[in-house]
Image (tube, helix red, strand yellow):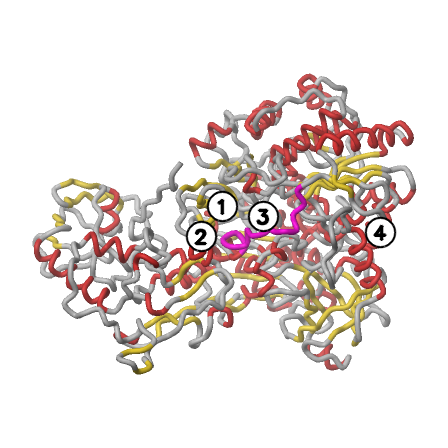
């Protein structure tokens, strides 16, 4: 094995269609118009020396190493900033160029440390490479480097010296090695869009500065790693490289955090992971990353990982380690006993959105073929199940319409109920780049998110709606578009049912749906809303991106359908730059839905009651399938409390922390007789488990993930599973213990079965993915290259369906006892329930959940920033510290749910979406008051968790 090769072409590729032919070093080369001479040379295999140029950022022309000579032109222009032209004759190596380049390199080396043998970048240093490339053998100016190389010069303190900045937990900044190429500054600006870095000083005093001469940890840096990746020397270096050394081989795999699905090179020494480097050919991330995917992989080797199976009779008992065979036999015996005693439908399972498609497929297969029922559900129940229902009704398919590249062609963007800079940061960087290029932005969110106003970006309209009024606001946007005649009649007549449109148009045109009518209860100024509607309808390519702030409501499905109505009415479907795009929360939540994880659907979103579909699986699996839909997660918990549901297999989900109304979840789990949890750590749900099966990380398995754009990406094993088995092997062994004759030897065989049974995956195989890199479903004979854009010539269902979206106020209402509205979300450094990110250095940025409260509401309650407060609702109460900020509107408070000590979901209620049971996390009536300590629930829960984590034969850590 070796490192995955990547060519740095020096400058970005040109998108021009017109081709230009020129001659470089005697070779005739044809490239797109607008291509730099440097890139044209590299494409021909001619490497021009460079230091400030890299193809992730625009040409800069500062290092003066890439000079060339052009016949008929004076001087020696920089090849990175000089575009090709027809008939040019270029020379990249002449005696004149050699002399100039050596002189330039002498200046660089004269002020650079010569500790190459002990430098962390030794073997991966472009400065070192270029010194060799230009034939540098001596430096006429000496090597003293009195500007900023040494702390002391001639026995005196060197005032220009800057010590190494090691404040960031993941990388170091050594100013003495900076060559001021500005690649890090430009990467921060052009790729990430944070503008956290600058160059301070002039001449030899110049150096990179985070913010206003701050430490990295105190600056606006978001630790995405773009600057580290761009740095050509050891100025910015991963601490892992410093401690381990340079990697010697790598494999391309897929990040296991959010639904963007970034591709990374896992760079290794033996079986030790040195670093994760974003892969330039990754079609979701295009070589960019965020702090989680780039650096937060330490959980995979954390001491908290459980590596041996464990069982116990009662949840009050300590855990007892057993062999894998004992664990499988115990689970099989218990599940058989429960079904014999309570009936076939008394057990079920939950698939994981963090596991691979293949593993999720096997879990739902185990439940249907082994358990004999359809009691299977997944975390999409509590996040994007309304997306599946709403888009399925309107368009005929349950997924987003575009690829992420589409955002580069959009002119007007609506971001509703999503905070991509925190939840989907790599996509957010691509969006911000398009906004800096001139696209317009409309943000619909109760909070003033970063996208509303950040460096070089300002939303044209921010609609700060009151939580729970999504349907009213989106319908009011449609009201303006219809009543002012801004809809696309040609598109609607060709692609949609015109009579249904007329019915819908008459509905939204009613005066009660006007911006003026909804302003009193939505809180959105009517003129602002009208301006947003006009901009979206007339501004060119219009795209809509939405998140859990849309779906996690009692009218989540209704809002999704309202968004689909808006896109169809304006003709914004079926081409690049437009579309309806759900930003999925977890790495494989799309895939878990695709694989048949809902109780009413088999893989490929085909209803369990369809005889023809069941026949396909019955013949292949050799069993008779139940044609009745099974229980959803909330139904399983209800049935457990009632005494009819007694056993559950939970793979890679922590429902006690992630699902709403924690007290009800804990009551349901406590009522069961066999709870089996398969995970990396003893999570919160494991407090109520009787069997724990150790899980494996994404680094320890082969498989595929499907991201938010329907992209199927390979996951490749780079190290041996520390628990001995990949998750798919554990499920197969459990199935065999229950009498099923499964004999898969590799996940590729599972994918072959998926392809054979699921039309949208018909041409997908590991061999095909190795050839094409990744593919977006549907991928079949009709779409052999996959489907980057959906509904190009018509909707999957035939004609697009306009649906009336009546606003119905939630039953969760404020009042004298609970006058404020709580809404919840995520933060950049943490992920979901925090089981992974809390076991990394990311806690430096978010060590606890905080409650955002407006200064007005805080003052009325005598609360100051940092005070402990009591957060109470009708469901329960908890305590956490306040963060006083005007990012939230008066009457609205906000918190995250990453830390189990907070137990934020003890506050949320059991209200849910009318169609899918997706919980209403985003609207909870609460009261805030000063607090002196933890709530009774937190005290009781902390003791339960401590007791639950006892393992026989292992000493507890001292207090």
Q: Which residue is mark 3?
A: 300
Tell me the CA gap for discs 1 and 3: 11 Å
Total marks placed: 4
In this rendered view, identify the residue nearer to me: 763 or 125.
Answer: 125
| Mark 3 or 2: the one toward you | 2
Q: Secondary structure at mark 4?
A: helix
Q: Quadrant of residue 184?
A: bottom left
Task: Tell me if 308 is positioned left or right of 819 in this view.
Answer: left
| Mark 4 or 2: the one toward you | 2
Q: Which residue is mark 4?
A: 664
Residue 82, image x, y percentages:
21, 56
Mark 2 or mark 4, which is nearer the start of the sequence?
A: 2
Is disc 1 in contact with disc 2, using a CB cutoff of under 8 Å?
Answer: yes
Q: Quadrant of the C terminus?
A: bottom right
Residue 295 is covered by the magenta coloring: yes
Q: Which residues are magenta?
A: 292-307
Is disc 3 in contact with disc 4, using a CB cutoff of under 8 Å?
Answer: no
Question: Vertical placement of 755 versus 458: above or below?
Answer: above
In this rendered view, identify the residue nearer to me: 133 or 552.
Answer: 133
Tell me the CA gap for discs 3 and 4: 31 Å
Q: Which residue is mark 2?
A: 244
């Amino acid at each position: 094995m070796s490192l995955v090769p990547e060519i740095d072409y020096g400058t970005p590729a040109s998108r021009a269609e017109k081709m230009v032919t020129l001659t470089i070093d005697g070779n005739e080369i044809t490239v797109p118009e607008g291509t730099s001479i440097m890139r044209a040379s590299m494409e021909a295999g001619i490497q021009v020396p460079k230091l400030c140029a890299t193809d992730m950022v625009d040409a800069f022309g500062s290092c003066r190493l890439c000079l060339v000579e052009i016949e008929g032109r004076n001087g020696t222009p920089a090849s990175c900033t000089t575009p090709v032209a027809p008939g040019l004759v270029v020379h990249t190596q002449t005696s004149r160029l050699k002399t100039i380049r050596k002189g330039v390199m002498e200046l660089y080396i004269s002020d650079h440390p010569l500790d190459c043998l002990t430098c962390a970048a030794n073997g991966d240093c472009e400065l070192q490479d270029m010194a060799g490339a230009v034939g540098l053998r001596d430096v006429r100016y000496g090597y003293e480097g009195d500007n900023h190389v040494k702390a002391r010069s001639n026995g005196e303190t060197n005032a220009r010296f800057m010590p190494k900045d090691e404040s960031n937990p993941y990388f170091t900044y050594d100013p003495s090695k900076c060559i001021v190429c500005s690649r890090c500054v430009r990467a921060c600006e052009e790729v990430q869009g944070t503008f956290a870095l600058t160059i301070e000083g002039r001449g030899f005093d110049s150096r990179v500065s985070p913010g206003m001469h701050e430490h990295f940890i105190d600056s606006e840096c978001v630790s995405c790693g773009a600057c580290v990746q761009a740095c050509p020397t050891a100025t910015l270096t991963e601490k892992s490289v410093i401690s381990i050394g340079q990697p010697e081989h790598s494999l391309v795999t897929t990040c296991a955090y959010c639904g963007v699905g970034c591709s990374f090179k896992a760079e290794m020494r033996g079986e030790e992971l040195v670093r994760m480097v974003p892969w330039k050919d990754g079609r979701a991330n295009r070589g960019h990353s965020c702090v989680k995917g780039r650096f937060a992989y330490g959980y995979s080797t954390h001491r908290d990982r459980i590596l041996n199976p464990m069982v116990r009779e009662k949840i009050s008992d300590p855990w007892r380690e057993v062999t894998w065979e004992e664990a499988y036999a115990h689970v099989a015996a218990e599940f058989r006993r429960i079904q014999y005693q309570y009936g076939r439908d008394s057990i079920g399972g939950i698939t994981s959105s963090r596991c691979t498609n293949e593993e999720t497929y096997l879990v739902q297969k185990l439940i249907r073929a082994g358990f004999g029922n359809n009691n299977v559900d997944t975390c999409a129940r509590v996040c994007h199940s309304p997306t599946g229902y709403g888009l399925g009704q309107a368009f005929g398919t349950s997924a987003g319409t575009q690829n992420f590249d589409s955002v580069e062609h959009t002119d007007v963007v609506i971001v509703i109920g999503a905070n991509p800079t925190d939840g989907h940061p790599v996509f957010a960087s691509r969006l911000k780049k398009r906004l800096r290029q001139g696209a317009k932005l409309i943000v619909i969110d109760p909070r003033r998110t970063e996208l509303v106003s950040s460096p070089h970006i300002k939303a044209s309209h921010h609609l700060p709606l009151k939580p729970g009024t999504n349907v009213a606001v989106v319908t009011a946007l449609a009201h303006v578009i219809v009543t002012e005649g801004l809809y696309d009649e040609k598109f609607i007549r060709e692609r949609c049912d015109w009579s249904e449109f007329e019915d819908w148009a008459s509905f939204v045109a009613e005066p009660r749906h006007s911006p003026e009518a909804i302003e009193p209860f939505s809180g959105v100024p009517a003129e602002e809303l009208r301006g947003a509607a006009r901009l979206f309808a007339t501004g060119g390519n219009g795209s809509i991106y939405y998140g859990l702030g849309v779906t996690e409501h009692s009218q989540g499905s209704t809002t999704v359908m309202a968004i689909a109505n808006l896109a169809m009415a304006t003709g914004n479907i079926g081409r690049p730059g437009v579309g309806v795009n759900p930003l999925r929360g977890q790495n494989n939540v799309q895939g878990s839905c695709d694989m048949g994880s809902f109780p009413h659907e088999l893989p490929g979103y085909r209803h369990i009651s369809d005889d023809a579909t069941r026949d396909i699986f019955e013949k292949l699996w050799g069993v008779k399938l139940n044609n009745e839909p099974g229980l959803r997660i909330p139904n399983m918990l209800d049935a457990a409390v009632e005494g009819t549901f007694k056993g559950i297999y939970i793979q890679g989900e922590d429902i006690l922390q992630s699902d709403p109304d924690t007290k009800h979840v804990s009551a349901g789990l406590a009522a069961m007789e066999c709870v089996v949890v398969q995970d990396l750590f003893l999570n919160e749900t494991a407090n109520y488990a009787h069997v724990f099966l150790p899980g494996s990380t994404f680094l320890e398995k082969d498989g595929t993930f499907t991201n938010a754009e329907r992209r199927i990406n390979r996951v490749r094993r780079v190290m041996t599973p520390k628990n001995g088995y990949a998750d798919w092997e554990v499920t197969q062994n459990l199935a065999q213990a229950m009498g099923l004759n499964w004999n898969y030897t590799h996940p590729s065989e599972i994918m072959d079965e998926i392809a054979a049974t699921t039309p949208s995956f018909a041409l997908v195989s590991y061999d095909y993915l190795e050839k094409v890199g990744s593919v977006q479903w549907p991928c079949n004979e009709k779409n052999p290259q996959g489907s980057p854009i959906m509904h190009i010539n018509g909707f999957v269902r035939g004609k697009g369906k306009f649906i009336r979206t009546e606003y119905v106020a939630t039953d969760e209402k404020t009042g004298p006892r609970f006058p404020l509205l709580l809404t919840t979300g995520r933060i950049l450094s943490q992920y979901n329930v925090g089981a992974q990110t809390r076991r990394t250095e990311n806690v430096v940025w978010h060590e606890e959940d905080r409650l955002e409260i407006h200064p007005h509401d805080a003052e009325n309650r005598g609360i100051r920033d940092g005070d402990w407060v009591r957060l109470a609702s009708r469901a329960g109460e908890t305590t956490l510290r306040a963060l006083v900020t005007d990012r939230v509107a008066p009457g609205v408070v906000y918190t995250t749910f990453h830390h189990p000590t907070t137990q934020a979901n003890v506050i949320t209620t059991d209200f849910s979406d009318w169609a899918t049971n997706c919980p209403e996390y985003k609207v909870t009536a609460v009261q805030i008051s000063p607090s002196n300590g933890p709530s009774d629930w937190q005290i009781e829960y902390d003791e339960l968790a401590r007791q639950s984590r006892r393992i026989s034969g292992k000493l507890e850590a001292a207090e």
